[in-house]
């Protein structure tokens, strides 16, 4: 628990110190914001700062800092370092600067920013890529919470229909009518879950592996994990450390801010808060898998199913290993029901459900905004929003129908989504680096994480068995070549400018 405590303190200190450093590098001022200059009572509306923070937090959270942190801790205590340093020096910087760049450019989206700083070809590619990502995220976050809610009450398809109707409302309605009123309540539910689970952790004080016990791949020996720690850990934990998905959501809030000086608590602060969520669930995962916590929270009948196999790993009666039997959603439901009782577990599970529902709804709204921005269409009239949203809804329904018919197939697709969001993070960091270099500011704050994330996504592309499946050394060499090419290209383009 010492690593957990130090990590929490480090995130707070990082926000207070490094967050201020990054803010001074960017230099927010008192210029008129898009919410005032382009007010349209639909997407450009001034909202209170605390509401914007809550919406931003829910938009970027989803199940990423929960499920991703649980699976990331399978690699061992190294996950703590990635969450802390990734969040402070990578994710929060990424979120703050991409949000502030959008604020400076009339609330434009990631694709338009990419076009401004990386060129027209990159813009076109990112429009297609981000639209695809929004559709996949939206469809996934219909089905995932529907499964959880049906376990509490009602039928799965009933929840699928209700959630999709909610998505239609969040996509079509002015941002202050649904999102501005509902999201803060969902955020409180999410925060309650984190505080409640964190409090039980502090009371129990379980003996857990610490960072200084070793930073190797603990899961390879104890859980049968086959993926290498690098780069798999840095893709598995995305939303709790660095995630390019956030750069697609920040423009929505950039259109609702009345002052640039709100940027640090909203963009940097929301990411740090998400890091805290990831820390709590990573620690839960450490307790569950490395301190035999699963034995304490499961019924004796479940415990008796497991026996040691020939490979030295624990296997259930059907042959599944510990991490195959207890996947991330199962860990969440088991811990919540065991630690918080019936009432507490329902509230906590609603917190887990609220995050993906809000993120899915925001994804469809973001898709509409991307289309309107790329096509130059105004969205002040409800009819115009409906016409532009129809293809978005049609694509979402098609993906949802495919997912329901092929539930195992979508888990494979989701691995590409995890890689895709980190690819967007690398692109966003390069966009921010080019911007900072053009205005002669300390661009090293984004250059270093841009280089690191480029190496991560390149290596994962080559080494992942679901993509290229190349040997580890070959993948590292190819990733190094790609990363070096990006560095040289940046240096040459900067000299030309």
Image (spheres, rainbow, N blue to C red):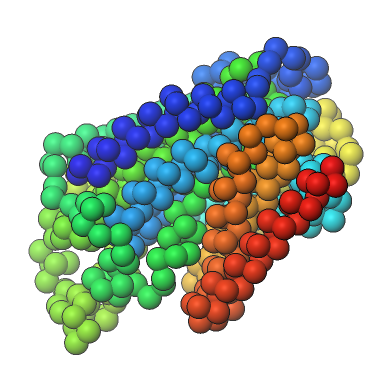
Horizontal and vertical percent position of residue 490: 74, 52
Seen as rendered, the residue at the extreme front is: 495
Q: Is residue 451 visible?
A: yes
In which image quadrant can residue 321 be found?
bottom left
Q: How many marks?
A: 0
Horizontal and vertical percent position of residue 233: 43, 60
Seen as rendered, the residue at the extreme top is: 30
Describe residue 205's horizontal placement relative to residue 391 as left or right. left
Decide which of 205, 446 is in the foreground and name it.
446
Describe residue 424's horizontal placement relative to residue 120 as left or right. left
Residue at the image point whose x is 14% and y is 67% from the top? 303
Seen as rendered, the residue at the extreme right is: 376
Decide which of 49, 297 is in the foreground and name it.
49
Residue at the image point whose x is 43% and y is 24% from the top? 16
Image: 213 above or below 93: below
Residue at the image point whose x is 88% and y is 44% from the top? 375
Seen as rendered, the residue at the extreme bottom is: 310
Residue at the image point whose x is 73% and y is 32% from the top? 440
Image: 102 above or below 258: below
Horizontal and vertical percent position of residue 50: 52, 19
Horizontal and vertical percent position of residue 80: 34, 49
Describe residue 272's horizontal placement relative to residue 421 as left or right. left
Image: 253 above or below 387: above
Q: Which quadrant holds the N terminus?
A: top left
Q: Is residue 102 visible?
A: no
In which image quadrant can residue 497 be found?
top right
Image: 238 above or below 479: above
Decide which of 47, 73 is in the foreground and name it.
73
Describe residue 283's horizontal placement relative to residue 155 as left or right. left
């Amino acid at each position: 628990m010492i690593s957990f405590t130090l990590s929490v303190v480090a995130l707070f200190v990082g926000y207070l110190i490094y967050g201020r450093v990054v803010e001074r590098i960017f230099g927010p001022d008192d210029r008129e914001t898009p919410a005032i200059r382009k007010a349209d009572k639909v997407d450009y509306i001034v909202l209170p700062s605390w509401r914007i923070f809550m919406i931003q937090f829910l938009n970027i959270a989803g199940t990423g800092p929960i499920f991703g942190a649980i699976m990331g801790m399978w690699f061992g205590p190294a996950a703590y370092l990635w969450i802390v340093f990734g969040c402070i020096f990578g994710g929060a910087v990424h979120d703050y600067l991409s949000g502030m760049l959008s604020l400076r450019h009339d609330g434009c989206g990631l694709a338009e920013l990419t076009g401004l700083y990386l060129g027209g070809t990159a813009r076109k590619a990112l429009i297609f890529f981000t639209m695809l990502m929004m559709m996949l995220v939206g469809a996934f976050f219909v089905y995932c919470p529907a499964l959880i809610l049906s376990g509490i009450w009602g039928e799965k398809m009933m929840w699928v229909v209700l959630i999709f109707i909610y998505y239609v409302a969040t996509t079509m309605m002015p941002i202050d009518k649904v999102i501005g009123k509902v999201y803060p309540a969902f955020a409180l539910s999410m925060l309650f879950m984190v505080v409640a689970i964190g409090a039980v952790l502090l009371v129990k004080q379980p003996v857990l592996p610490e960072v200084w016990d070793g930073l190797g791949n603990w899961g390879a020996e104890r859980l049968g994990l086959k993926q290498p720690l690098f780069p798999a850990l840095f893709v598995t934990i995305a939303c709790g450390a660095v995630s390019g998905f956030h750069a697609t959501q920040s423009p929505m809030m950039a259109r609702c801010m009345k002052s640039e000086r709100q940027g640090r608590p909203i963009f940097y602060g929301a990411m740090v808060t998400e890091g805290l969520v990831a820390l709590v669930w990573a620690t839960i995962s450490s307790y569950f898998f490395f301190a035999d916590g699963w034995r304490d929270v499961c019924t004796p009948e479940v415990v008796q199913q497991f026996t040691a196999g020939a490979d030295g790993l624990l296997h259930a009666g059907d042959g599944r290993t510990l991490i195959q039997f207890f996947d991330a959603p199962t860990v969440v439901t088991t811990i919540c029901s065991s630690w918080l009782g019936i009432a507490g577990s329902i509230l906590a599970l609603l917190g887990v459900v609220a995050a993906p529902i809000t993120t899915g709804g925001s994804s469809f709204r973001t898709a509409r905004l991307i289309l309107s921005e790329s096509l130059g269409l105004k969205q002040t009239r409800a009819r115009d929003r409906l016409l532009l949203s129809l293809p978005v809804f049609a694509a979402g329904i098609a993906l949802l129908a495919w997912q329901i018919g092929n539930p195992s197939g979508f888990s494979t697709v989701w691995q590409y989504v995890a890689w895709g969001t980190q690819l967007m993070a690398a692109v966003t960091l390069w966009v921010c680096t080019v911007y900072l270099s053009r205005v002669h500011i300390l661009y090293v704050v984004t250059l270093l994480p841009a280089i690191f994330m480029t190496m991560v996504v390149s290596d994962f592309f080559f080494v992942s068995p679901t993509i290229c499946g190349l040997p580890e050394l070959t993948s590292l060499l190819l990733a190094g070549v790609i990363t070096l090419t990006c560095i040289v290209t940046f240096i040459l383009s900067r000299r030309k400018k």
